Every structure is written in structure tokens, then in C-alpha cells.
Amino acid sequence: MINNPKVTHEIHATPPGDLAIWVFIFAELLAFGVFFVAYAFARANNVELFNESQQHLNRTSGAINTLVLITSSYFMVRAVAAIKQGLSKPCALWIASAIGLGFVFLAIKIAEFQATFAAGISLSTNTFYMFYLSLTLFHFMHVILGMVILAAIMLKALRGGYSAENHIGVETGASYWHMVDLLWIILFPLVYVIR
Amino acid sequence: MSETFTKAMARNIFYGGAVFFFLLFLGLTFDTMQQLPSRDHRENITDSVVRGKHIWETRNCIGCHTLMGEGAYFAPELGNVYVRRGGPFIKAWIQSQPTGVPGRRQMPNFNLNEQELDDMVAFLKWTSEVNTNKWPPNIEG
Amino acid sequence: MQYQSQAVAKPYFIAAIGLFVGQILFGLIMGYQYVVGDFLFPEIPFNVARMVHTNLLIVWLLFGFMGATHYLIPEEAETELFSPKLGLITFWVFLVAGALTIVGYLMVPYATLAAMTGNDLLPTMGREFLEQPLITKVGIVIVVLTFLFNISMTVLKGRKTSISLVLLVGLWGLAIFFLFSFYNPSNLVLDKYFWWWTVHLWVEGVWELILGAMLAFVLIKVTGVDREVIEKWLYVIIAMTLITGIIGTGHHYFWIGTPEYWQWFGSVFSALEPIPFFMMTVFAFNMVNRRRREHPNKAATLWALGTGVMAFLGAGVWGFLHTLAPVNFFTHGTQITAAHGHMAFYGAYVMVNLAMISYAMPMMRGRTANSAAAQTMEMWSFWLMTVSIVFITLFLTAAGILQVWLQRMGTTPMSFMAAQDQIMVFYWLREITGFVFLLGLVLYIWSFFCKKGEAQTAA
Amino acid sequence: MDKPHKPHFIRACTYIWLALIILTCITYAIGETGWSGTAVMLTVLGTAVIKVEMVASYFMGLRRTRWLWRGIVLGWLILVSGLITIAYFKSLG
């Protein structure tokens, strides 16, 4: 029976990808969440310092990075869509482009860090920079870890390791990558914009 | 939970998470090592301070006292004792032990000579000058 | 007992319990010295008693871990030990080295012991928990390396299960981080920084891996739940342990001269450290509820469940109590730390060792479980010891809160000794509870010799 | 079996992607103006909350799962943004 084009909206019992990654995702959300709240309350204690130091941030590069990550995240959605149709090669291609944008994010971020460190700013300069550098460096490492995961999945996809029926690995990598994007979506306005 | 939660993925997260956070820990350690010289004034570590630390260790002072809050909780904190009491008091106190007052906590007499006493004071002086983020809360330590 | 070489574990367990009794005796001496300052002075000054108490604790836990490893690795790897003889040699070398060290602490003034044992060559003595002379430290390294060689070869030639792999990672981690005890720079801040790499990354890092592996093994045997499920949970729990515990070292870097950002990293990550212990409790109860067999050894099941709960209470809850920097600013170096220390060590590491011993000992004596009478006695000892530790922790917490109030807060703080005099009542209560603990321990030992009722040898 | 049909969520996610791009540009624009104050902060934070909810529901596919999973992420989001708002009001006071 050919199922109708508008497929019924069936509800899965568990989120896409391996449940173990979701335990890790929730732990990371908790850790970042506590850091975001800590930033907010630390800001409440010295507003002038935070507002003044925030001026020196490169908001443009932060915004571009947000766009980069969102697009990269979208690419992963397309990668999952591709593999659901059993198209291994296109799926690998989408993942490769997602990793490509990941490199773009890293490049922009490294440039931003270089400028910051060149200006003699370090973790101990003041509370704002401590939070700014901690949060962005912590997120930066998560982007790298995410790209390692995506690379592993891409290689397996290239070897035809996934199929329409069995592609839980791709969904796992996609879920983690979306989390990395999701965290940056909060981090950008909180650190770069709100004053 | 059914097949949606595989052991292989959990194992990967264990190894990945451990390596990831150990690298982050090494990064923070590297930065700390850069910042420390300006915070602990290591330029003030004279031979006397080194000998003082050696005496502090070989008499197992940490077995009763705390130093910067770490050690045994039987006797007072000595991280800021130099500020609290001053060098001469420390030397006199060490020499006058044990008090022998019945029922009170006793400190053995380590029979330190004049040189060793000066070294101990130098070590405690250096320790009191380390930037410990304003700890302890007050002079009592 | 499926493999003959598992019997090598027996002397380890016996030595472990023997040293445990010694630890408690010295604990009682120190407890009394807190209230009657000059008790046994100058024969056994407080710092010597403390050294013996803490070193016996660590050494008996290590004996327990090594005994547990010698017991479970052959069964996990489904092959005989690589060399049972080597296992016994390691045991005797470790026991003699440990005994000599303790005798050295007691018989000779510490400074003389240092001079005698080449401390001038490479000074590593005089630091909390690492007071052992240089030759003992070198001896420990040799013992642990031969032990690891013996165990690793066994696993290599046998079946590799997740439990044995996790246990090996934990044991190799233990050996590697012990090497930091040889690094003792003259800069106190650097000394403390890397001292925590041995102490913290042991008890809140690799030891939790060993704890997880041992608990998983006992639960598989006692509940019969299939290995796949238990090993999945094990990996998730120890993943969370290292994710939170490694950076969690930061909660020791608040006040020792390290930069201020550690107050944020240390607080945030160590605040998450109770999560793996909570998961371990849920895991233990979940497995026991979904058990597929009624194992006759009820006592071991009780110990396994108790480990989860008490580890979460002692290490998790009591740890969180004083891990946030603003709180730790006041409670650092007070009796609150001691309270956490007692319940955390007992809940996490003492209980998992006792669970392993109470599971393995009957097996090694040819029966699946002790008689009902013996098990009842053992359960009595469980409740006596656990409840008394809870009370000791409560008394020390109360003492700590009062100490903080008197000595650390307000505009007219009391001196240390004046504050100590005000909290003497809690030290008396703690000392009395200590004797109840000793009673529980004696009951535990006696339960292995209880002749009443016949041992159960159900399959 | 004929080629499995194109997943239905592609088109939805494409629209979501565009929406996210636009919302980011808005946030950036607000940032560039340098305005501050409660209204601006609530707008920016609100935008971020909407964006995160979109990513979680559509990109992460939580819309197609039991309410529990979506609830966890949404609950976390509300808690964090709520605390940030409280901290912001505290900073004004």
C-alpha cells in the first residue's frame, strides 16, 4: 500500500539519535545553563564593568558566527533528510558542508580570540572577560568535539554504513550539532547584545 | 530501555567526555601556571623559605594544623599566623611547647635551633603573602 | 567460585578488614584527643595518630580494591589469573611495606623517620595523606605496577568485558595519578596544585570508576539482570563522573593562590558532581527491583543498595553543602570538611568494599551465602555502622556550623581554640558514636564466624 | 518498494532556517544600535528563546517525539531565560 504523500504525523517514543547522547546533551545544557545564569547574576553585581567591557567585543563576528552555525545546523537537517531516503552520498555531502561551516566558525572565533589576547585580555583581566572567555572557549571546544563526531559519521556514510532503515548514528551526530548551535543562539545575545 | 540506547554510544561518550574535559583541565592549568608567578610572589622564595618548608614537612605540622585551610582541624590555621601573631611570637611559641596544661591539646617540642626557627618563620611569612583571594575571612583564620 | 585463582583475593580481604579495625581504633584515639587534649601525649601525639588513621584508611581501601580485582577479573575474563603466585607476592610485599610504615610512624619521631628513609634525597613526606616515607612510596609504585601487570595480562588473555575494562582504566588511572605524589616543589602553591591531582583525581575521578565497576559486578551477580543493561548504565554513570569530576578539581583551587576564575569553574562543575552518584542510586535500586533471581546473599544486596544511597548522601549532598565558593569561603578548613570526609569515604568506598567482601567471602568458602543467622548479624552491623556514620557526620556538621558562626563570621570572631571549646559537646557525642561504629564493625567480623544455622549453597 | 518519499520536514525546516537568519539579523541590529533597557533586553531574550524553541522542535525533531523530551528542553529554556530576566531586573535595582 503506498502510503499517502502527506505522511501521518507519528510520534516517536524517544528523540532522534541514540538516547545516550541525549543524556550527554542534557548534562551539557545543565552545565551551560548554570554558567549562563552565573553570568547574568555576576553581571547584576557589576553592571558598569560588564557594559563597558562589552563594548570592546566584536559583535559583528559574533553575529556572523550565529548565522554560520544556524546554517550549518540546517545542513545537518538536510543530511538526516537525505539518509532517511537512503541517499548515502548526498548525506555525506551535507555533513561535509556542515563541517565546512564549522571550520568557518572556528576561523572567525580564532581571529576574535587573537584580537582579544593581543589586547592583553586574559581570563584574569576582569569578571566580564573571565565569563566571556570561559563561555566562548568552552563552546569553542564543543564545536571542535562536534566536528570530530560529524567527521566520523561522514566517513561511515561515505562507506555506505547508513541506510534508510538504519541511520541512528547520523541522527545522534545531528542532535549533538544542533545542541552546539542552540547554546550559541543563547550565548550570542546574552554576552554580546544584552546591556 | 530498548535498542535506542546502545552501550557503544555510552562508551564513546565516556571516552570522548573524559578526554574532552581533561584537555579543558590542562588548558586551565596552563593558564593558571601563567598567572601564578604574579600571585604567589615566587621571587620571594629564599633559601630560608625552602628550608622552612622542609622543616614544616619533616615535623608533620599538617597533621594538626591547616595551611591555607587544608590539613588537620585539630590546631589553628597557620596560613596567616605571621600576620596574626608576628615572627617573634611564633618562635617563642614553638620553643615554649608543650604547655603541659592538663586536658588541653598539646604540641610537641621539636627542639628547633635558632636557624630552623627563622626558616620556619620565613616560610610562614611567604605563605601569608600569597594572594589567596582574600581568604581566610578574618585574622583568626 | 568458578576459578581457583580467585582465592588469591581472600588474604587481601582479610588484611583489608584487619587494617580497617586498626583505622577505627586510631580514629577513636583521635576522637578522644579532641576532647581530652593530652590523652596519650607525648607517646602518640595527635599528628601521628592522624597519619596512622588516614594512611590505614587509604591502604585498607587499596587492599579491598586489589582483593576485589583479584576476585572479579578471573570471573569476568573467564580465565585463571595470569600468575596467582605473583598476586600473593604482591600481597605480602604490600602488607609488609604498609606495616613497617605504620610502625615507623609510631616508634620513631617523624623527623627521624624522614632522615632515615632518604627524604633529603627527594623530599615527598609531610603532606596530608602522602606522609609515607620515600621508600614506602617507591614500594607502593612497585606493588601497584606488578599488580596491574598481573591483572592486565589476565584480561588480555581472557574475555574483555566492559566491567573489566572500566576497572582497568580506573586502576591504571590510580597508578598514574599516584606519581604526582613524588612532585613536591618548594613553591607551596604549586605543591598544593598538583597534590590535588593525586588526591582529588583519585577520590572524585578514577576511584569512582573502580567503585562503578565493583558495584556493577556485584549487581550482575546478585540480581541476575543481563550484563548489557548494567554495562550501559555503568558507562553513562562514569561518563558523568569524569565530565563533572575532572574540572570539579577546581573546588580545591578557590583559596590556595590560584586565579579567581577557578571559583566559577570549580563551583559550577563540582555542583554537578552529585549527579553520577544520584544515577548510581537509581541504577542500583532499578537493577534490584528488576532482578531475575532471588540471590540468597541478602546482606550483599543490602550493602550494594546502601553504597548507592550513602555515596549520594555523603559525597553528593554533603559535598554540595560546601562546594560553592561563596559558602566555601566560610566553611573551608572547618569541621564541615571533616563531616563530608567521613560520610563520603564511608558511603562511597568503604561500603562498596564491604559489599564485595560480603558477596565474595562466602563464595570463597564454598557456599553461595552465609546462614540466615549470620546474614542477620551482618545486616545489624550494616545498620549500626551506617547509622553511626550518619550521626558522626551530623555532629561534625553541627560543630562546623557553630565553628563558622563563632570563628569566621561577625565583627568579633573568636580565636580558634576558644571556638573549639564552645563545640566540645559535639566532639563528645562524636566519640561515643565512634564506639557504636566499632561495635558494628566487630559484629561484621563476627558474622563471618557465626556457626548458627546452615550455610546456603543454592546454585 | 518505491523510493521512500521526500521527508515532509524538509520544507518546514527550510522556512525555520530563514526565520532564524532573520531573527539573528534583528538581534544583531538591536545590538548595533546600542540601546539598552528592559524592553530591549526582553525583546532580545525573547527572540533567543523563540529561536532556541524552533531549533529544538524542528531541527532537533522534538516535535515528532513524546511531549516529555520537548518539555525537558522547554523547561530548561524557560528556567534559564527566567533567571536571566530576574538577574537583569536585579541589576536595574
Image (cartoon, coloured by chain):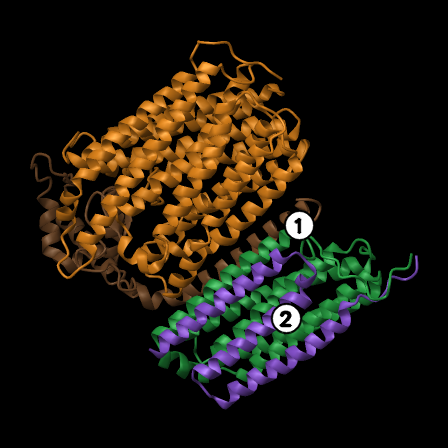
Chain colours: A green, B brown, C orange, D purple
- Tag 1 subunit: B
Q: Is residue C451 left or right of residue C406?
A: right
Tell me the number on the disc at residue A109: none
Residue B52, image x, y percentages: 23, 52
Q: Nearer the viewer, residue C268 or C63?
A: C268
Q: Is residue D56 left or right of residue C438?
A: right
Q: Is residue A122 left or right of residue C429?
A: right
Crowd class of label 2 (few under 14; some 14 to 19; many from 20; radius 10 Å): many
- Label 1, label 2: how many angstroms apart (C-alpha)? 27 Å
Question: Can you identify the residue that label 2 sits on?
Answer: D54
Secondary element type, mark 2: helix
Residue C152, image x, y percentages: 60, 35
For badge 1, the amino acid type reads Met
Question: Can you identify the residue that label 1 sits on?
Answer: B9
Quadrant of residue C434 in the image? top left
- Indicate which label's residue lies in the foreground, 1 or 2: 2
- Tag 2 subunit: D
